[in-house]
């Protein structure tokens, strides 16, 4: 049985925001999902249908080359553009070619080969509105080796997303400022020359090949021989910093002159580009640039990153978001994800940037647990979907799937094939598909080749099945027999079962360090036997958080993200809301109450505002158990005291009334801090307690509650030291290391 569905919004713009892919544009594609294993049959059906619905044009013989000459007035966005377009058409389908431009642009002149005609029509169903340009040949004309035409047009350029902010401009494929195709879009190369008033500057991908003044205008040239999915053009009144490194150029385009800031980013880029070149293969572009913008975004484009003014001044960004954006030059902008199979680039980038950099610092175990918590907090039956359907982040749930779950899938793939084969597979995948589209099927074949093992079932389960396993240690016991010990471990997982390679840590007398065993889970309930030479003292499932799963109730500490992600959320306001909590409550809760009794508390998670409420006592009792004392003058933590005045506090705890969910207590020092608190708190989802100061407000303290792995372990002897073998990082070398 074959299910056919039209996808009317296949993304075109492949940039990403805040480390996630951000898509614009609306080409039409046909997507198939098949409930059969006969791939050859499915492929045959696909080809028949594509013949029926696809226009007769084709660009199968390489990228389209654009030679763009642009005269731009940044203040009005008015531009005069001449585009010389060249490509090698497919001789099998050379009757006509179709391009699209934004409808605000007027075609003034065109030049097409002899015996070819051009027709123009408005494409009304599109958003934004487009003009359709169809070039068709006469029957007597032959198909040229290289097709070439010139389009001259002008008008107001459409700012697709304006990440550059009000002070600059940003045009991408989604702006349709140059002619584009629809359907299976070919890649592009280009030469770009822009004339604009001095002191404006422009940035694009590729190499800056010219920068000169002609009267009061600046003429800047960029060119890119590396195939890309689209052309970017952005500009502002930049201060430019430049350096050379290993044969390519490094830039920092800043809105203000800041030598030290520019130097930090240029030097840091060298270290991470060297690191990922050694890890994966040569850097794929002629340059890399940091480009500052006035909006607080983080975009990753081919050969440059666009980051917010405030963001780049946070010290931690240099070694968190920045390497993530640099790595996107390999994944996403070097190898392009085949979106019909799902966007794999975000999860792989997160795994080799965010995760790997922490793993090299010995913090990989904690990071993986946090990512599993994100999935648990934000994903439920209503908003879950398989990785094959992930295109880009548009919610906390989609981020938890396309980033958190997927990076864990890559971690499990690494466990499945081993570190050496995993690295070989990454390098081979990059080498084969650089400047090409690739999907999970391609990835599977590469890793099967390097590991000499079948991975079809692995990819099928994790890419095409939604949800997550939920496992627990049902029972563990042992018997002694002539100096040996038979340990029996019973493991349960919720039905339908996932197939899992599950690590089991076993501690025995005489050794502080556990032995790690691997078992194959394939059923809802399974028993495993271990023959030991020493008496077991404890056993624990998944001690390193290597398996993607849903943490159990006891294992998952209460966190702010659990309250935000709950399906049912109720807010309780104090009787006298003189601080203005109402605004906050309206932004986070479906239902708001001001008077209540504990006995009538509904199901779900709770937001509790203010100091005077009937749940205050419950909060105080639980916090005291964790060493936090709530008093008349403020809150005392083990290390410091914070007065009520000018401080805001956020505490998230599990409910104590036998109902599932969390309760988050918010106390602000003044009403001026509420807007800032509302804006900032979603970024602190992993924390159980937070302290802020001032109107901004600024974070002064944060922390997580301890996790209790009770559902995963059995302790036979209390008080015995239990250590785990040290995990070996994926690579022995680190960024900025000389060797």
Image: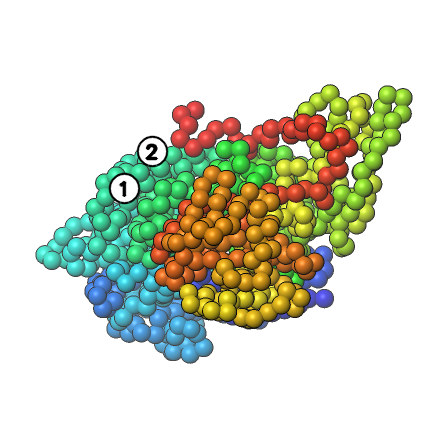
Q: Is residue 182 above or below residue 472?
A: below
Q: Position of residue 1 (x, y in %)?
A: 72, 66
Q: In the shown orientation, is residue 456 left or right of residue 736?
A: right
Residue named by callout 2:
246
- Dot 2: few (<14), some (14–19), or many (≥20) neighbours within 10 Å? few
Residue 369 at least partly seen: no
- Dot 1: few (<14), some (14–19), or many (≥20) neighbours within 10 Å? many
Residue named by callout 1:
262
Quadrant hosting residue 199: bottom left
Camera-side residue of 200 and 580: 580
Q: Is residue 198 above or below residue 45?
A: above
Q: Is residue 489 above or below residue 435?
A: above
Q: Is residue 4 above or below residue 705?
A: below
Quadrant hosting residue 464: bottom right
SS class, disc 1: helix
Q: Determine the residue positioned at 27% across, 42% down.
A: 262
What is the C-alpha distance between the residues marked 2 and 1? 19 Å
Q: Position of residue 333 (x, y in %)?
A: 43, 49
Dot label at residue 678: none
Q: In the shown orientation, is residue 591 left or right of residue 229?
A: right
Q: Position of residue 254 (x, y in %)?
A: 26, 48
Q: In the shown orientation, is residue 422 left or right of residue 135?
A: right
Q: Determine the residue positioned at 63% across, 56% down.
A: 655
Camera-side residue of 490 and 611: 611
Q: Determine the residue positioned at 58% across, 56% down.
A: 617
């Amino acid at each position: 049985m074959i299910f056919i569905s039209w996808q009317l919004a296949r993304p075109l713009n492949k940039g990403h925001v805040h480390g996630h892919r951000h898509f614009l544009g609306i080409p039409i594609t046909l997507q198939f999902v098949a409930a059969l294993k006969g791939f050859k049959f499915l492929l045959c059906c696909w080809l028949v249908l594509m013949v029926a619905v696809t226009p007769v044009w084709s660009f199968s013989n390489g990228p389209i080359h654009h030679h763009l000459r642009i005269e731009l007035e940044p203040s009005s966005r008015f531009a005069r553009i001449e585009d010389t377009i060249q490509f090698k058409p497919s001789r099998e389908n050379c009757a006509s070619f179709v391009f699209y431009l934004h409808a605000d642009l007027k075609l003034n002149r065109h030049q097409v080969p002899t015996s070819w005609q051009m027709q123009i029509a408005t494409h009304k169903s599109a958003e934004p509105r487009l003009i359709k340009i169809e070039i068709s040949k006469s029957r007597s004309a032959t198909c040229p080796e290289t097709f070439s035409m010139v389009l001259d047009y002008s008008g107001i350029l459409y700012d697709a997303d304006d990440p550059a902010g009000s002070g600059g401009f940003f045009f991408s494929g989604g702006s349709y400022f140059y002619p584009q195709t629809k359907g299976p879009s070919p890649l592009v190369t280009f030469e770009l020359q822009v004339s604009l008033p001095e002191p404006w500057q422009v940035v694009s991908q590729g190499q800056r090949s010219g920068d000169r003044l002609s009267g009061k205008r600046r003429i800047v040239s960029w060119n890119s021989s590396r195939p890309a999915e689209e052309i970017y053009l952005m500009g502002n009144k930049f201060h430019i910093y430049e350096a050379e490194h290993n044969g390519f150029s490094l830039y920092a385009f800043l809105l203000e002159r800041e030598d030290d800031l520019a130097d930090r980013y240029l030097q840091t880029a060298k270290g991470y580009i060297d690191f990922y070149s050694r890890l994966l293969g040569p850097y794929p572009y002629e340059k890399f640039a940091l480009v500052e913008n006035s909006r607080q975004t983080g975009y990753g484009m081919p050969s440059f990153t666009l980051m917010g003014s405030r963001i780049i001044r946070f010290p931690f960004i240099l070694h968190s978001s920045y390497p993530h954006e640099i790595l996107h030059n390999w994944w996403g902008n070097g190898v392009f994800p085949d979106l019909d199979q799902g966007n794999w680039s975000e999860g792989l980038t997160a795994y080799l940037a965010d995760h790997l950099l922490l793993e090299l610092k010995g913090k990989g175990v904690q990071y993986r647990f946090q990512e599993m918590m994100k999935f648990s907090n934000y994903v439920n039956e209503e908003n879950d979907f398989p990785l094959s359907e992930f295109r880009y982040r548009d919610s906390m749930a989609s981020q938890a799937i396309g980033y958190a779950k997927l990076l864990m899938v890559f971690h499990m793939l690494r466990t499945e094939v081993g570190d050496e084969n995993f690295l070989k597979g990454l390098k081979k995948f990059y080498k084969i598909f650089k400047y090409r589209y690739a999907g999970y099927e391609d990835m599977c074949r590469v890793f099967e080749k390097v590991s000499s093992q079948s991975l079809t079932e692995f990819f099928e389960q994790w890419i095409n099945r939604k949800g997550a396993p939920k496992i627990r240690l049902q029972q563990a016991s042992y018997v002694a027999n002539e100096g040996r010990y038979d340990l029996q471990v019973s493991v349960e997982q919720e039905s339908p079962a996932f197939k899992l390679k599950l690590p089991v840590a076993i501690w025995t007398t005489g050794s502080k360090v556990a032995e790690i065993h691997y078992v194959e889970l394939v059923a809802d309930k399974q028993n495993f036997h271990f023959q030991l030479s020493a008496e077991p003292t404890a056993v624990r499932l998944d001690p390193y958080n290597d398996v993607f799963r849903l943490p159990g109730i006891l294992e998952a500490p209460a966190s702010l993200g659990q309250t935000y992600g709950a399906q049912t959320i109720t807010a309780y306001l104090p009787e006298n809301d003189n601080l203005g909590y109402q605004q906050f409550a309206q932004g986070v809760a479906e239902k708001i109450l001001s008077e209540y009794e504990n006995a009538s508390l509904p199901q779900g998670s709770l937001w509790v505002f203010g100091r005077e409420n009937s749940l205050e006592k419950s909060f105080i009792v639980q916090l005291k158990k964790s060493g936090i004392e709530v008093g008349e003058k403020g809150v005392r933590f083990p290390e410091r005291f914070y007065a009520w005045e000018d401080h805001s506090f956020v505490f998230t705890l599990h409910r104590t009334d036998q109902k599932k969910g969390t309760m988050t207590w918010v106390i602000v020092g003044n009403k001026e801090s509420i807007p800032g608190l509302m804006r900032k708190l979603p970024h602190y989802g992993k924390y159980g307690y937070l302290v802020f100061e001032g109107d901004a407000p600024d974070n002064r303290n944060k922390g997580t509650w301890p996790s209790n792995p009770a559902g995963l372990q059995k302790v036979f002897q209390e008080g015995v030291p239990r250590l785990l073998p040290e995990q070996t990082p994926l690579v022995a070398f680190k960024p900025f290391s000389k060797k």
